[in-house]
Image (cartoon, grey):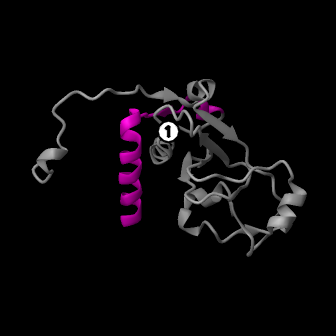
Amino acid sequence: LGVDVPAHALLTESVPTVPAATVGTLLAERHLRVLPGTRLSPHELGDTGLVVVGADDLENTAAIGATRIDAFAFAEAHPSAQLTAPGDVVFRTAPTPRAWVEADGSTVVAYPARVLRIDSDDPGGLVPALVAADIERSAGGAGSWRRWVLRRVPPHARAPLGTALADIAAQR
């Protein structure tokens, strides 16, 4: 391993690390916020308008975008609901944990799916793609999501790691 890695890419000095933390701890430290999904009725859904992401969509993220809701009807029926922002992690807990990183924002999340929003001013070393990967490998069950352990990276490594993970996802 490392034979094909350029010499300048190898690190010779020690790099400070940021310890992993549970979702509950990160919520208490205000690095994360949880936003609930919106309870939608089937008659509200259609094929035009805002994209709707539900818990079932997280099983096959390629299908995201097929279900939609009219923006004006949604705003009228759910005035306190929030749309996603770029970098939000949409997740579900059952039957198995699944997560998806919202790249563009302005998506409606349908209950029982929820959103983890990373604080942009103080992210605490969290990278959205890494958070989603950690959720996917976590145990499910009632209330388990607060005990999920999320890896964190030092501040200087956040942007390069995010870029590298986005490049990998684009190549896939």
Q: Assign the C terminus to one quadrant of the image.
A: bottom left
Q: Residue shown at 68%/59% (left/top)? A: 107
Q: Is residue 124 left or right of residue 54?
A: left
**Residue of label 1:** 138
Are there few (<14), some (14-19), or many (20+) residues within 10 Å of tag 1?
some
Q: Is residue 172 visible?
A: no
Q: Position of residue 46 (x, y in %)?
A: 77, 73
Q: Nearer the viewer, residue 32 or 23?
A: 32
Question: Mainly helix, strand or loop, the magenta region?
Answer: helix
Q: Is residue 80 left or right of residue 125?
A: right
Q: Is residue 31 above or below residue 163?
A: above
Q: Is residue 68 left or right of residue 22?
A: right
Q: Is residue 169 magenta?
A: yes
Which residue in the rendered view is the most extreme toward the bottom?
47
Q: Nearer the viewer, residue 3 or 15?
A: 15
Q: Position of residue 70 (x, y in %)?
A: 80, 69
Q: Position of residue 163 (x, y in %)?
A: 39, 53
Instruction: Give the residue type at disc 1.
Output: Ser
Q: Is residue 55 left or right of residue 73?
A: left
Q: Nearer the viewer, residue 137 or 123?
A: 123
In the image, the segment drawn in magenta is 143-172
Q: Is residue 59 visible?
A: yes
Q: Residue shown at 85%/66% (left/top)? A: 72
Q: Position of residue 150 (x, y in %)?
A: 48, 34
Quadrant of residue 35 within the rendered picture: top right
Q: Is residue 1 magenta?
A: no
Q: Is residue 113 above or below residue 51?
A: above
Quadrant of residue 152 within the rendered picture: top left
